[in-house]
């Protein structure tokens, strides 16, 4: 009998120790899994630079073993890159076309107003969508025609393939009709150029606009998070994440995707001037 009790006690202790060992297994994440590692590559829209940069920084602060990269090539190039498998997530500041959706999945991250910008010295404060279209197609050529001072209007825009250009021209109905003086390859270049020319007009992501230029109201409505969200500011477009349909992302890229499309990321997106959809 004594031998039986000893065996039972030994078995009990072995079981208890095994249970303690399992309960004490932790990881750096505190979730019972190993720390996240690997790389995440994004490519595309320059308009999304501040938003995606801030999200990438926040994510890698929580996951220091993950390497995050962003390549600001423009929406068209980003869509090509993800289609060809050269990045994990393509960034587009326009909706995907039906043709692109045959191989890619579109997820809207946020909404962004396209600000109509002029030089700080310009006295014009408001334009209608119709006036903007007439300016960019050459029907209106002088600021005096819209209540400003005498001066030939200098048209600044983005290069072909830009999501900002696509959104602007679609909304104003000026596709293939804009008479650009300069077609620039980034949002920052547009802002800088307009800031240096008193007669220039341009368009840029609201998320990127600063005090170096003057933002016009459109039809009496100023671009803001509130007016973009309620639709009263009509010159707006989506910030889109493009991924390859039917292909799984890497664990690191999937974790990043899940994070930036969750409500946890909303405050960061708002701080960068865009309107989160979640």
Image: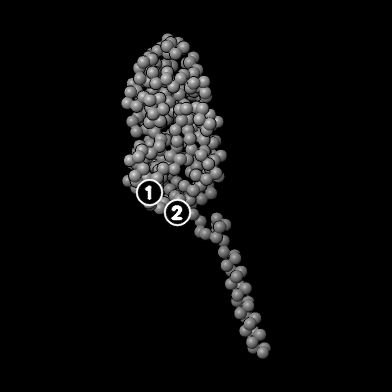
Q: Nearer the viewer, residue 107 or 80?
A: 107
Q: Which residue is mark 1?
A: 245
Helix or strand or loop: what does disc 2 sit on?
A: helix
State the residue at coordinates (62%, 80%): 10
Look at the image and tell me whether residue 130 can be seen.
Answer: yes
Give the vertical position of 67 relative to 204 (above or below): below
Residue at position x 39%, y 18% from top?
135
Disc sitting over residue 114 in the figure: none
Which residue is painted at 65% across and 84% down in the image?
6
At label 1, counting other C-alpha atoms closer than 10 Å, the crowd grade (few under 14, some 14-19, many 20 or more) is few
Name the image quarter holding the N terminus: bottom right
In depth, the one of 177 and 208 nearer the eye is 177
**Res 5 quadrant in image:** bottom right
Question: Going 42% across and 11% down the picture, which residue do you hit?
Answer: 145
**Image quarter of residue 263:** top right
The residue nearer to you, when weighing 43 against 167, is: 167
The percent position of residue 13, horizontal first and vertical second, equals 63, 77
Q: Residue 92's spot in the image, x, y percent?
A: 40, 38
Which of the labelled discs sits on residue 251, or is there none?
2
Which numbered disc, 1 or 2, marks the residue that appears first in the sequence? 1
Q: Nearer the viewer, residue 158 or 231?
A: 231
Please tell me how crowded label 2 is: few (under 14), some (14-19), or many (20+) other residues with Cα within 10 Å: some
Q: Nearer the viewer, mark 1 or mark 2?
A: 1
Q: Secondary structure at mark 1?
A: loop
Q: Is residue 195 above or below residue 243?
A: above
Specify the color scheme: one colour
When the figure is inspected, residue 47 is found, relative to residue 32, above or below; the finding is: above
The Cα atoms of the two marked residues, 1 and 2, are separated by 16 Å
In the image, residue 25 above or below residue 93: below
Q: How far from the left and from the top, in percent, is residue 53?
A: 47, 40
């Amino acid at each position: 009998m004594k031998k039986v009790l000893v065996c039972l006690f030994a078995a009990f202790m072995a079981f208890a120790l095994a249970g303690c060992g399992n309960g004490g297994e932790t990881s750096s994440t505190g979730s019972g899994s190993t720390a996240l590692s690997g790389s995440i590559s994004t490519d595309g829209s320059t308009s999304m630079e501040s938003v995606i940069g801030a999200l990438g920084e926040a994510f890698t602060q929580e996951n220091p073993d993950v390497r995050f990269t962003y390549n600001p090539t423009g929406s068209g190039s980003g869509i090509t890159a993800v289609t060809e498998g050269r990045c994990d997530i393509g960034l587009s500041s326009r909706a995907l076309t039906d043709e692109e959706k045959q191989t890619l999945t579109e997820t809207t991250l946020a909404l962004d107003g396209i600000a109509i910008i002029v030089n700080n010295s310009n006295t014009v404060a408001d334009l209608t969508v119709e006036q903007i279209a007439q300016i960019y197609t050459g029907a209106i050529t002088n600021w005096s025609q819209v209540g400003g001072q005498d001066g030939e209007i200098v048209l600044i825009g983005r290069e072909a393939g830009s999501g900002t250009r696509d959104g602007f021209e679609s909304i104003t109905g000026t596709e293939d009709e804009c008479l650009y003086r300069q077609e620039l390859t980034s949002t920052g270049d547009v802002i800088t150029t307009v800031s240096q020319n008193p007669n220039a007009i341009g368009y840029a992501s609201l998320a990127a606009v600063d005090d170096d230029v003057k933002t016009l109201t459109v039809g009496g409505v100023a671009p803001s998070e509130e007016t973009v969200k309620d639709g009263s500011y009509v010159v707006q477009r989506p910030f889109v994440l493009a991924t390859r349909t039917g292909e799984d992302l890497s664990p690191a890229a999937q974790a990043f995707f899940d994070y930036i499309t969750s409500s946890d990321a909303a405050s960061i997106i708002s701080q960068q001037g865009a309107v989160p959809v979640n």
